[in-house]
Amino acid sequence: MTQTSVSGRAREDYTKAQRSARLRRLWANLTGQNVGLVPYEDLKRTLRFTTQRYRGLDAVPLDKIIGSLGRSRDFDRAFLPTQRHSRSKWLSVDSAMLSGVSLPAVSLYKVGDAYFVVNGHHRVSVSRQKGRKFIDAEVIEVQSRVPVTADLTLDDLDLLGAYRDFLE
């Protein structure tokens, strides 16, 4: 693939991803669903994590990545880009993948059965849009007394906080 065709294809991919994000947001507003990423900071504050340990490199299922450290407004739950300022980085990552460039592993926190992106948001986003099922990640596991699953939403945080209070 030539550089011109790679860049054109990346622009098409981004336009499609942004269109999908807008449609998901519209549908969520109509149905009352929450399609936002779970902010790691909010989960940490709610659950008061105890310890963490380095787990190493692992192939992580992309559908178990449900949140973000510091970038939860830049992507939706499907890791579709929601902000225009992400465009150039998204295009760069997509172009690299289209060209066959091997990108470094992302960095994730693992809490229970769910993962939160520390570094590599755009790599996760592009990988999901390309239909990949797994991504290589450096994983740090965070211990929580309250079980966390990959279907957790922002709406569940109050309930988890009450459960944590009960356990304490």
Image: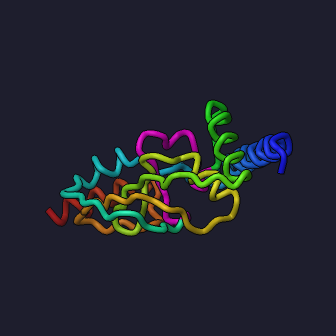
Side of 52 where 76 appears, left or right: right
Residue under the point 84% across and 40% down: 4
Residue under the point 68% across and 56% down: 129
Is residue 73 visible in this depiction of the protein? yes
Foreground pick, 26 / 14: 14
Residue under the point 83% across and 51% down: 1
Q: Which region of the structure is painted magenta? A: 62-79
Foreground pick, 3 / 151: 3
Q: Position of residue 60 (x, y in %)?
A: 48, 66
To which quarter of the image does residue 143 belong? bottom left
Colour scheme in use: rainbow
Callout count: 0
Does the magenta portion include 47? no
Give the prevailing secondary structure in the magenta stretch: loop
Side of 1 where 79 appears, left or right: left
Q: Position of residue 95 (x, y in %)?
A: 71, 45
Side of 48 where 112 appears, left or right: right
Side of 67 where 76 appears, left or right: right
Q: Residue furthest left?
A: 168
Q: Residue furthest top?
A: 85
Foreground pick, 167 / 41: 41
Does the magenta portion include 74? yes
Quarter of the rendering occupied by the C terminus: bottom left
Q: Position of residue 24 (x, y in %)?
A: 69, 51
Is residue 33 visible in this depiction of the protein? no
Foreground pick, 148 / 167: 148
Residue under the point 67% across and 35% down: 87
